[in-house]
Image (cartoon, grey):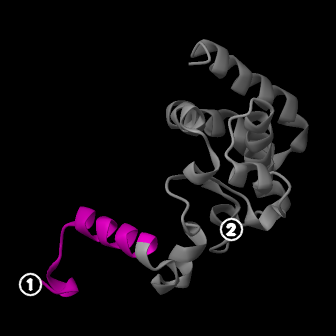
Amino acid sequence: MLDACQITDPVSWKKRVLAIAERNHAALPPWIRAARPSGSGKVWDSVAWQTKADRNVGADEAARPIRLVLSWLNRRDLLTAQGKRLVGAPNEQLALTSALLVPKAAQFLDTHYQRWHDRHGINLIMNASGAASAEEALERLWLQDGEK
């Protein structure tokens, strides 16, 4: 049996951390717990990612793209019950995770979220006035995919 010091494959470490997260989330170091909410599955974005580690972004700003996407998905009935509850949560608690989404929405975010965030979400963090164009971009991507 190998001990932790003998495992050199980074994929093995990632699998080990994911297994611990699923089995006993509280056993993870605090910096990992903050980045990976309990029972969240896949995480596309999190306010904690933007506000921790000496980042110069406040929770209100970091929440803008996440809240916009959650609201947009909610209007299309693409959130789970847990996701619908999170729509009104305080900004500090917001994260965009697979536990909040129906499978069709998760597939959509897998395909488009990173590119959308790079083009629109970042600007939304810096200036709330871009919300309408950011939402229009989500709509165009949704229509482009034929609403699967």
Q: Residue furthest right?
A: 129
- Residue nearer the viewer, 63 or 145: 145
Q: Residue furthest left?
A: 1
Neighbourhood count class around disc 2 (C-alpha, 10 Å): few under 14, some 14–19, many 20 upward: few
Q: Earlier in the sequence, mark 1 or mark 2?
A: 1
Residue at point 56%, 49% (across, down):
98
Residue at point 75%, 29% (across, down):
76
Q: Quadrant of the C terminus?
A: top right
Which span of residues is magenta-colored?
1-22
Please check the rendered image and state whether residue 21 is part of the magenta-colored stretch, yes or no: yes
- Position of 4 compared to 52: left or right? left
- Position of 14 compared to 65: left or right? left
**Height in image: 129 above or below 56?**
above
The answer to whether any part of residue 68 appears in the image is yes
**Which of the labelled discs sits on residue 1, or is there none?**
1
Place of residue 27 in the rendered image (x, y in percent of width and height, measured from the top left): 46, 85
The secondary structure type at the circle numbered 2 is loop
Residue at point 59%, 67% (across, down):
37
Q: Main secondary structure of the magenta part?
A: helix
- Position of 30 compared to 19: left or right? right
